[in-house]
Amino acid sequence: ARRLAEQGWAVVAAARRLDRLGELAAGHPGIRPCALDVTDPRSVEALADAAPTCDLLVANAGGAFDLAPLADADVDTWARTYDVNVLGTVRTVQALLPALQASRGQVVLTGSTAGRWVYEGGGGYVAAKHAIAALRDTLRLELVESGVRVSEVAPGMVATPEFSTVRFGGDQAKADAVYAGVDALTAEDVADAIVWVATRPAHVNIDLVQLTPQQQAGVGKVVRH
């Protein structure tokens, strides 16, 4: 949101936590906060009302909520993962699509290397991110004649304050161990990729950008120092 605002975009920043959105908007006059829960259809409708014109949708909501083997997986947790990552994306795209078609705009989905690689304990999240990859390919085909561009930015290991902490139920030690010895990607690295994708000329569609730390060559190949 900050990077886009710095480049002159009028940004509607939508998320569940209005306190954080307020802090974000306070320092950047080009950012307008809007409450959004992508699992609530009425909340998504309110976002569409707040953004009657739209040139770019960055569908960034998501998360992983467990690391359980398939044999022990909690189906309700899987359902939550699917609702946030996949159905939330579908709801948001559907709500903003008329405005995007009117502007011949662009959709950028935040995927993951988990949309291409599998790993033990990652079944629920991996399935959801594989679904995002399928949504991107499908949406690209369905919207090509409308002039709307569709892209996916798929990061590997990104060290952020909350992703792994949430996944491990608040266990900070386990969360820190994921990135120990790895110079992981940062949120700013991913933002750079999203902004680059969003600022290509209108005749250029970047289908997929996959970015990883130099030390990560695959799920089973992470070099730690």
Image (spheres, helix red, strand yellow):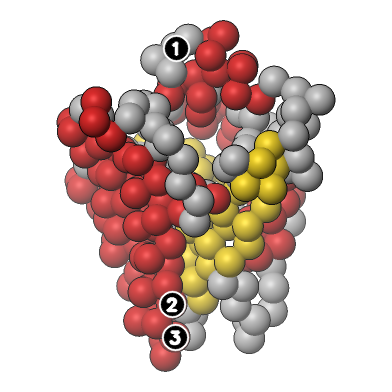
Sequence-wise, the earlier of marks 3 and 1 is: 3
Relative to 151, is 185 on the left or the right? right
As drawn, 24 above or below 207: above
Which residue in the rendered view is the most extreme toward the right? 225
Disc 3 packing (10 Å; few <14; some 14–19; many ≥20): few
**Position of residue 53 measured from the top left corner of the image (x, y, whole percent):** 44, 66
Q: Distance between the residues labelled 3 and 2?
A: 6 Å
Which residue position holds label 1? 170
Camera sees residue 198: yes
The three-letter amino acid code for the residue at tag 1 is Gly
Which residue position holds label 2? 140
SS assignment at label 3: helix
Q: How far apart are marks 3 and 1 (CA)?
A: 42 Å
Relative to 211, is 75 on the left or the right? left
Q: Looking at the rendering, which quadrant does residue 131 occupy?
A: bottom left
Q: Looking at the rendering, which quadrant does residue 196 occupy?
A: bottom right
The three-letter amino acid code for the residue at tag 2 is Arg
Please tell me which residue is depicted at 66% across the width and 25% down the height of the picture.
179
Residue 144 badge: 3
